[in-house]
Image (cartoon, rainbow, N blue to C red):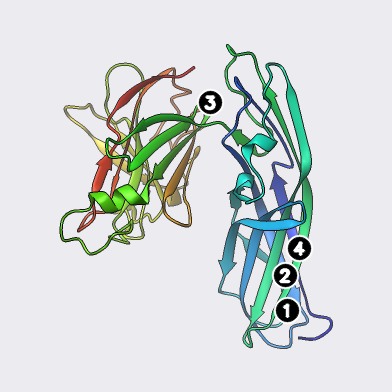
Amino acid sequence: MTGNAAAQVENYQFNGTTIEGASDDGSLSEIRVWVENGTFGYEGLENAATTATVELQAVYNGSTHTIASTTREDISGQSQHDLAFERLEGDVLAHPDLSASKFESGTDGETVTTDDVDLQLTVTVTTTTDATVSGSVASNLTVVMTNTESTASGGGSTGGSVRSYETIAQSDDGWQTLKADFGEVTHFKIELDPDHYEDGVPEGNNGTEWPDNPDEYFQEVIVDHGADGPTDEYRFGFHGPGGLGSTDNTEGYIRANYGTDDSPDRKDFGENEDIEGFTASESDDKLTYTFTVDWTTLGVDGDLAAPGKPGEVYLEAFGGDGGEGRMGSTGTVYYNVK
């Protein structure tokens, strides 16, 4: 590597450098931050580049922890610029030295401001000789958390988001737990307990880790938007690399029911079909699935109309991995959105 070799993040937009949140007990579950519209470049390499990894990092008390990353393996040459990288999103509380209590407010009406955490973007370029060159940019993060009166509803956020999840339902065997943070933008989360997966697999199954079928697995939140009885108006899901039906979608999808419970008429929309108001993500260990729904913009080319924030819902978490694996459900529960 020459003395003039350099890699740098060129363009980026941090969302969440100031995050304001509120909850009726001052508590929070996650602090989501993201960066988008990013590009990077490199120059002065002795050998051609082969890969570049961009990491979104939380920096606290001298310790740096990566909370999201992406890698491009389609780069080459000794100098390139304006290379785009995909949106990165992560939870600041994934940093091992940080906990929710650092940011929480314990007294009604109290506001706690925390500003000693930094966000950092680091790009590392690797060449054909396995030599590396890196560059970073950083921005300060400010979190403002308010404990509202106990009768007040949950608050929102500016930029990033503070999420305070409520446990909605759990499967009888404890394998699946469904959580939600309701608002105009609602966040659903399905958490899987790997120990209960092992306990519940069929007799004779040699695979004891989820997913036993690495291609044909899925997790979804089933939502009946209203109080007219449980149906499956919306299924917000995440599917493995085998693809969901005709969508060939390997990640997020919506399955909308245009019919009734007795006579369903379902249509699938994959995230790669430019769904508005919906994203889905899977954790690296495949044990947490997060779905974000913006009820005010939800739609696909006019086929799926935005219903607005629900006042009452029926909810269920449902998923499985087929083959020698297992299926599971929390069962359907009624929830009155505060």
Asked whether the beta carbons under mark 1 and mark 3 sit within 8 Å of each other, the answer is no
> Pointer 3: what residue?
183
Identify the mark nearer the N-term, 1 or 4: 1
Q: Which secondary structure lies at badge 3?
A: loop
Q: Which of marks 2 and 4 is in front?
A: 4
Answer yes or no: is residue 50 visible: yes
Asked whether the beta carbons under mark 1 and mark 2 sit within 8 Å of each other, the answer is yes
Q: Residue at x 66, y 82 (%)?
A: 77
**Label 4 crowd bin: few (<14), some (14–19), many (20+), radius 10 Å:** some
Q: Of residues 174 and 232, which is closer to you in this image?
A: 174
Q: Nearer the viewer, mark 2 or mark 3?
A: 3
Q: Which amino acid does label 4 sit on?
A: Ser
Q: Where is residue 329 in the image (x, y as percent from the top left)?
A: 27, 38
Q: Which secondary structure lies at badge 2?
A: strand
Q: Which of marks 1 and 4 is in front?
A: 4
Q: Where is residue 284 in the image (x, y as percent from the top left)?
A: 48, 57
> Pointer 4: what residue?
136
Check the image and report above or below for 135 versus 321: below
Name which quarter of the figure residue 1 lies in.
bottom right
Asked whether the beta carbons under mark 1 and mark 4 sit within 8 Å of each other, the answer is no
Q: Where is residue 238 in the image (x, y as percent from the top left)?
A: 38, 48
> Pointer 1: what residue?
79
**Label 2 crowd bin: few (<14), some (14–19), many (20+), radius 10 Å:** many
Q: Residue at x 45, y 39 (%)?
A: 189
Asked whether the beta carbons under mark 2 and mark 3 sit within 8 Å of each other, the answer is no
Identify the mark nearer the N-term, 2 or 3: 2
Left/right placement of residue 197 relative to residue 98 reads: left
Q: Which amino acid does label 1 sit on?
A: Ser
Asked whether the beta carbons under mark 4 and mark 3 sit within 8 Å of each other, the answer is no
Left/right placement of residue 168 relative to residue 45 reads: left
Kindly identify which numbered label has been placed on residue 41. Answer: 2
Q: Distance between the residues labelled 1 and 2?
A: 7 Å
